[in-house]
Image: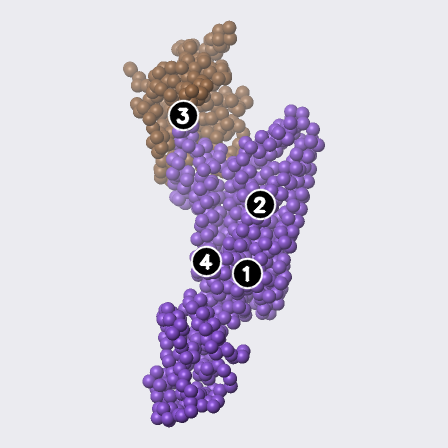
Chain colours: A purple, B brown
Amino acid sequence: MLTKLSLAGIKNRFKDYLVLLTGLIISAAVFYMFANLATNREFVKSNTQISMASQVFIFGMILLILITIVYIAYANSFLLSMRQHDYGLFMMLGAKKNRIGELVFIETLLIGVISTIVGIVLGIGMSMGLSQILFNQLGLTVHHFNALYWPAIVTTICLYVGLFLLSGIFNLAKLVRTPVLKLLHIDDEVYLSKRRPLVQLTEIVAGILLLAIGYVAMAKIMTLQLLAVPLALVTITLGSYLLFSAVIVGAVELLKQTNFANKKLHNFTLAQIMFRVRSYTRILTIVSLLFALALGAISVGAGFQRQAPQMAKSTSAYTMAINDMDKKEHNLVSQLNDTHTLTYSQKIVDNTVYYNEQEFVDHPLPMLDSRQALNDGSLKTLPISQFKKVALDDMDFTGLVPKNGQQKSEFATQSNFENLNRATTHTVTIIRLNNILAQRKILDRLEKLQQQRFPAPTMATVGGFQTYKMFNALFSGLEFMGFFLGFAFLAMLASCLMFKILSGANKDIVRYNMLNRIGTRRALMKQAVRGEILTLFALPGILGIVDVLFGLQMFKPLMYHPYAMTGWSILIFCVLYGVYYGITTLIYERLVIPKEQMNA
Amino acid sequence: MQKTPVVSVSGLHKIYGRKNERQYEALKGIDFTIDEGEFVGIMGASGSGKTTLLNLLSTLDTPTSGSVEVNGQDITGFKGKALSDFRSEEIGFIFQDFNLLESLTAKENIALPLSLQGVKKAEISKAVKEVATTLSIENLLSKYPTELSGGQKQRVAAARAIVHRPAIIMGDEPTGALDSKSARDLLDLMTDINKNQHVSVLLVTHDPFSASFCDRILFIQDGQIGQELKKADNNRQTFYQEILNQLGTFEQ
């Protein structure tokens, strides 16, 4: 009977349970996605050349576990607040405490198990989808990655079911210990601890100092080595927490003095923010950290992604050299956009390849300005006399020979070249294009055709495309992890925030109902909801972006331009984050804003 | 002098439930008017239709048929913005459970109706100060509702109800959650507002003591107005006795 009653209770509050379950499912899915990478040692090993990678993953894992614990604690208190009134009522009607305890325990565990299982299934789907998108869009090659990976499933189940077991025991203890009357009248009192300005000032100073320490630690990663990561994590977390709790309250108090506060519902919104920020400080801190991690991961991933084509440009003056271009190859080349092609004749006598000097006078072969890694691919052309001197030592030039053995290159005047006897004649065509990444598929096919006709025994790389492929293989794992983790963190943080905001809706229903009664236009109420949620979304977002801008300093030793893709990744990120904001606002408006009239 | 009615209700019906379902008629044809400056009480037992009537008068619900005019406007056809604007300009509410926003100070709560109408800051401050002086709650203005007693909260709510000079104040069991001393204070206060600020008051209650503060009482029973009592020149004690007698006749 009691079981039936408690099931009926769930049915009545299905909407709330839906919010709860969705949040937990997404959390489990994200955790699975992360565990999928972190527990896959072969994947980590084979895809990064950096020894730090596996340690970074361990840090990430610990962080994610901590976040999950906080998240489940939130979810559990939400669950308990939904149910305690019902259970109090059952007890008042004479149900035994032990039986109630049993029910609570089973319910908590059941919710945990359901959300974990659905979450893992979703996580597998998301891993599959995301990896497909990344492989196709970015041309990544990744080894040992499986969307369905058993150790990850086991890890996720262990963590989640374990945590829900703990929550169940906690709930049981709490319900059994709380007096019945209290259960029936649990109404969170609004707590108002007025803070002294001195304390607030201290908080601000300490917060900024801690953040600064964290930022400096990341910039000095070369001297601090691996110590920089945990140091930055701790100081930035504490600093963000203090800043949130002090600055926002101060700012709202200031705003309240202005004329702005007295218009429309602004005062109400400000008050809501003030109250929220106090109870939300913890979650805002976590979200800002996750935001930074996610954005950082995507920025770094995108940075490496950009690095490969750039490295390709800086190592060779041309993208690819094609010997004796045939019809098929010609067709492919004509499909390429934005290309420069140059064709030179070759005559091979014994082991020497001769070039017609005149052709290089007419169409000089461009050379790299410098072979430094930071060169963005800028080229120069030399007068023929100078060119002849340097060309024979230049890889770009010596690499033009048909690849079937050790050959040396020589220049010949036009008449000498024409008079060469007993020679086989060949041509070589070089193509240079600006956007390797976009046309890599055609280049791949061209390369295959060349290799079939001119099988080369592991040649030194010639042409930018070779370099591109080499670095692409090298960086793919990093890029993949960056993007994968970035999106996973984003999903986690946004659902964390969304969940926390939505779980506060119950109290707001009363407030908005009252506003409606005293004649507040719906449009104004909607504005209030949007403004309030926007603040809760924007605050950690802004701090997260600042964190990233400083945090990318860590990657200076690894990348040329860690900031190259930051603008874009911030933009993409903000769009996705914005979508979450939109969804949250819509759901919230539906939940709290009443209709003007009862039956309208 | 012929007084113009602030509220005039005629042929008001309210039926709950859809057609071809079981229907329940909460109001079965109600007619009455409230003149400007009058203090009218509506009494009735639980389930008599009091709350339904109040909801219709305050546009929170729509009647099945009949009309309600407030300040000369027929309010039954209002929609959307017009509804909200009507509520925020013409009506002052006092509820049993205060309905103050606990995240705002008393001052901000009182200022809310004016902020909604876009009144300037200086004017808001002036109006709030004025009303606070009238209700002697100046020293409470900077406090939050959780720091106030029930009686104090209801005073703040009353201040919010009159700060924007509505056409009528509607009280829904405003003394229901108060101890007897605070209840009496509040009723004195409402009488004072009614007499000195010339604001019409409509008080919905089932408590004879509260009702004895009114000029006129409408007894509502099973969705109809059964009886009407006028205080006329009686003092409050006599009127109270009269109300008790009237209620006594209902019992039999």
What chain does badge 4 belong to? A
- Residue pushed farthest left? B1
Q: CA distance from mark 4 to mark 3?
A: 48 Å
Please name the amino acid that badge 3 sits on.
Asp
Q: Residue at x 57, y 54 (%)?
A: A33
- Tell me the subunit letter for badge 3: B
On the same chain, marks 1 and 3? The answer is no
Which quadrant is home to the C terminus of chain A?
A: top left
- Which numbered circle lies on residue A481? 1
The residue type indicated by label 2 comes to Val
Query: In terms of depth relative to the viewer, which is nearer, A266 or A439?
Result: A439
Marks 1/2: CA–CA distance: 24 Å
Label 1 Cα crowd, 10 Å radius (few <14 / some 14-19 / many 20+): many
Q: Are marks 4 and 1 in contact (CB under 8 Å)?
A: no
The residue carrying mark 4 is A570
For residue A118, the mark is: 2
